[in-house]
Image (cartoon, grey):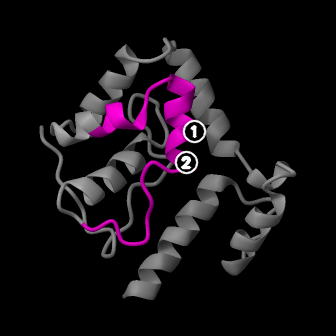
Amino acid sequence: MIATAQDLTQEPPSSPRMRIHNYVILARLADKARAAFMGGNVGEYHTDCPLDHKLLDWKGVTYDEIKKEILAGSDNENLALYLDKHGMRKTPEQVKSWSDEMEKLNPYADPEKREWYAGEVKKLGLRPESTTLFDWLEADDRAVLTKTS
């Protein structure tokens, strides 16, 4: 099935916690890339960004490789199959474990990111100490849509 591009000024990309073959981030990465490169509207979102690279670097796959698959029309299922077969080999258990850890990730715990993250999270009325990266991204998605509506 060929996936289509979204208008990300009208609806947010998929939640980073959405799992495809247990890979978090992949659906969001794909939504943003399709919007940017396949006639959608990427709005305020970024492609080839640090979030995308959390998955890509862990798997040992480049953004250009995934972009090529997306431009060829791969849907999310086929992108996950691509990740299964390329880059560093990961067992299904490793993928699940990594994704579980990503869902708990809080940049506030990183001294180099603490100040930046606290500022971003507080803009949305959230507490940096207890707001995961994915919680913040989902809240920011809601705020972006409210701002553009």
Q: Residue at x 31, y 23 (%)?
A: 81
Q: Secondary structure at mark 1?
A: helix
Dot 2, crowdedness within 10 Å: few (<14), some or many (≥20)? some
The quadrant in which residue 102 appears is top right
Compared with residue 85, is residue 97 higher up or lower down, i.e. above or below? below
Q: Amino acid at mark 2?
A: Leu
Residue 50 forms part of the magenta stretch: yes
Q: Is residue 82 above or below residue 148?
A: above
Residue 96 locus on image (x, y percent) = 55, 26
Reply above or below: 59 against 20: above
Residue 126: say if magenta. Answer: no
Helix, strand or loop at disc 2?
helix
**Amino acid tagged 1:** Lys
Asked if the residue under mark 2 is in contact with the one under mark 1, i.e. CB atoms within 8 Å, the reply is yes
Residue 22 position in % (x across, y down): 46, 30
Q: Which mark is residue 148?
A: none
Q: Residue at 49% of width from left, 74% of height from top?
A: 142
Residue at 56% x, 16% y is 93
- Residue 113 locus on image (x, y percent): 78, 55
What span is in magenta? 41-67
Locate residue 11, reporting x and y percent: 33, 70
Displayed quadrant of residue 120 = bottom right
Question: Mark 2 — residue?
Answer: 51
Q: Which residue is mark 1?
A: 54
Instruction: Determine the residue positioned at 35% across, 14% down.
Output: 85
Q: Residue furthest left?
A: 1
